[in-house]
Image (cartoon, helix red, strand yellow):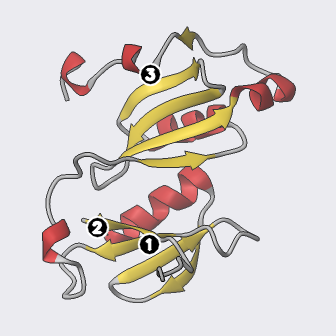
Amino acid sequence: MQANVNRILFNVLAKDLRASVEFYRRIANLQPVFESEWYVVLSPAGQPNVQIGLIDQVSEFAPRHAWGVHEGSYLTLVVDDVRLALREAREMGLDIIEEPVALNYGQTRMLIRDPNGLVIDISTPTADLARLGGESAPPAAVTAIDQPQPEDSPR
């Protein structure tokens, strides 16, 4: 017999909990569904089973084994229009790693860093962008490996 998953919740260790909440609110319209002094759970309106947790990295409840630089993971947020997220990212002065690029698997993706250094993939299905119209389609990339890498540009 195996255990069944009831909920999947990705937690981010937050250097500044309030700044992290504001980041996710502005970039993806996520709203708090639970708040305490050391932990906040965010969710898109009407989707209570889609959640991200933000935990104060110095909280006694933050696992010590998770402390440090985020390596080997990134968080993907699929939004209705990646171009709006790009505009907001620019207004916020965020670290934009990669502007929107149409990838050959049908997503248009941009990469940014959250206030904690975590790489965030913000994507929209490319076909949805075409239906929305507006700005021209982003440039296409052959594969994800063709994307700029961190060592390609100074931080």
Answer with mark 2 or mark 1, whichever residue precedes in sequence.
Answer: 2
Seen from the viewer's position, the closer of residues 64 and 94 is 64
> According to the image, label 1 marks what residue?
53
Q: Residues within 10 Å of mark 1 (few under 14, many from 20)?
A: many
Seen from the viewer's position, the closer of residues 155 and 69 is 69
What's the residue type where badge 1 is placed?
A: Gly
What's the residue type where badge 3 is placed?
A: Ala
Tell me: residue 123, above or below residue 24: above
Element type where label 2 sits in the image: strand
Mark 3 or 1: in front is 3
Q: Position of residue 111 (x, y in %)?
A: 44, 34
Count of marks placed on residues:
3
Q: Quadrant of residue 43?
A: bottom right
Q: Residues within 10 Å of mark 3 (few under 14, many from 20)?
A: few
Give the Cα separation between the discs numbered 3 and 1: 28 Å
Give the Cα separation between the discs numbered 2 and 1: 9 Å
Answer with mark 3 or mark 1, whichever residue precedes in sequence.
Answer: 1
Q: Position of residue 108 (x, y in %)?
A: 61, 27
Q: Residue furthest front?
A: 1
Q: Residue at x 69, y 15 (%)?
A: 137
Give the Cα separation between the discs numbered 3 and 2: 27 Å
Tell me: residue 53, above or below residue 28: below
Q: Position of residue 95 (x, y in %)?
A: 35, 36
What's the residue type where badge 2 is placed?
A: Leu
> According to the image, label 3 marks what residue?
144
> According to the image, label 2 marks what residue?
13
Seen from the viewer's position, the closer of residues 119 and 86 is 119
Tell me: residue 152, above or below residue 13: above
